[in-house]
Amino acid sequence: MPESSTRGEWRPSIAEQEWPVVLAETLDPTLESFVDGSGDPATDFPIQNLPLGSFSTHADQAPRLGVAIGGSVLDLKAVVEAGVLGDLPGEVRCALSAGSLNDYLRLGRPRWIATRLALSRLLRRDSPTLRDRADRDRLLRPRSAVRMHVPARIGDYTDFYASLHHATNVGSMFRPDNPLMPNWKHLPVGYHGRASSIIPSGMAVRRPHGQVLPPTASSPIWSPTRSLDYELELGFLVGPGNPLGRRIPVAEAIDHLHGIVLVNDWSARDVQAWEYQPLGPFNAKNFATSVSPWVVSFEALAPFLVAGPPRAADDPAPLAYLVRPDDFLPNLQLEVALSTSATRRDSSPSFVLSRGGYGSMYWSPSQMVAHHTSTGCNLQPGDLLASGTISGPNEESRGCLLERTWRGKNPLRLPDGSERSFLLDGDEVVMRGWCERPGFRRIGLGECRGEVLPAE
Ligand code: CA
């Protein structure tokens, strides 16, 4: 392995010639794997993706790390034990044998790139090491037969508010004359969320109770929320992080982000409307946050980074600590679909609630990291930074029902004739994200799925 070229600094660039040679090797669109389903043009997980996650099996319920490839999961603990991962250092092999990603996230980008290269070489069609092993089925399991977990122990979760369209839409519902607060275009607004209630895709969400002020009442009641909503977001999983008291400069911020997941920041809008002033959301958002289980690395995303974020000519220039001249956004396509208990029973198609992309976000992941740590606040491996609701310029690209139905005023009509202002019991929300670009293999994030259960 050309170890020397995996060391040193790596900066994402939209200019291919600046990628390290070993990274370019793993992104080659002509690479194929021997694993079933990995060559399907529609798969989220070709050999060019190689996302990591934490899974367990029915027979062994202890979580362990795996890599998604086609319709399979490569069991990394078993792979390390089999000794087929080349000459990766001991600390990498140790981290890959753990039950969650935290130790791996701590290692940093040169180690992530070396691991990616070793996995890519192991899984190629012309590589016999794993392909021809008699016990291959023990190392590669069907994805349909494993249970996925939250990929890391998330110590802290921060939620930003980085979409100009979302902030403007929501602001204009509550403050028609003054939708954007004076600070909004100067800093990436965020709040500290709740980590203990982050759950994996597939786990159902119980409709929460909360304190709400009915429209014509003068005092609040306590009841199940009547305006349960989803928020389509992207989550960034923190890598090495910073010691308390030391800032992360915006130019180095990407070194501290390993990869991305889909996030559904479930929200009780009636609870939120009553409680949010003056300190922001609290119980309206602390009952559940769903994440997709496969972490797609920035190495896999390298071909899909675009220059950004966009700024209008008359927007204020950000302060210097937020400026990276070659800043970037991952150029993802995103979709939210809804199925009801009836459509699932009849096997009818789900209804697409919104379609959009990440390229119009106003604040970049680098700016979120630089701003978050500008006080010396320490980020730690496995922390989750979420983007805030991803809304684009048109109605269909709005990333939550609050915006899609304009606070319930314009309900959506579903193909089965029913209407939605907010989510009903039995509704299931499915988020998907993927990247496409001519000359590269399509990669995807998989799904972030959650069904609404009735209040208890
Ligand atoms: Ca949110």
Image: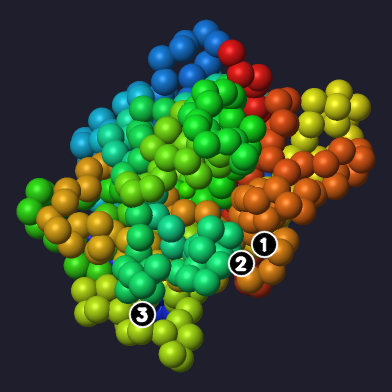
> Spatial distance from mark 2 to mark 1, Cα to Cα?
5 Å
User: Which residue position holds label 1?
Assistant: 397
Q: Report whether 286 appears left or right of 421.
A: left
Q: Is the distance from the Cβ of mark 2 to the nearest ligand 1 atom less than 8 Å? A: no
Q: Which of the 4 image quarters holds residue 145?
A: top right
State the SS at label 1.
Answer: helix
Q: Position of residue 381 (x, y in %)?
A: 26, 42
Q: Is the distance from the Cβ of mark 1 to the nearest ligand 1 atom less than 8 Å? A: no
Q: Position of residue 165 (x, y in %)?
A: 56, 67
Decide which of tag 3 and tag 2 comes sooner along the chain. 3
Quadrant where the C terminus is found in the figure: top right
Quadrant where the N terminus is found in the figure: bottom left
**Closest to the observer, 63 or 332:** 332
Residue lying at 87% horizontally and 38% vertically, measured from the top left: 418
Residue lying at 85% horizontally and 44% vertically, measured from the top left: 414
**Identity of the residue furthest to the top in this view:** 59
Instruction: Answer above or below: position of 365 versus 53.
Output: below
Q: What's under tag 2, amino acid-wise?
A: Gly
Q: What's under tag 3, amino acid-wise?
A: Asp
Q: Nearer the viewer, mark 1 or mark 3?
A: 1
State the SS at label 2.
Answer: loop
> Spatial distance from mark 3 to mark 2, Cα to Cα?
23 Å
Callout 2–callout 1 Cβ contact below 8 Å: yes
Q: Position of residue 447 (x, y in %)?
A: 62, 40
User: Which residue position holds label 3?
Assistant: 326
User: Which residue position holds label 2?
Assistant: 392
Q: Report whether 161 appears left or right of 88.
A: right
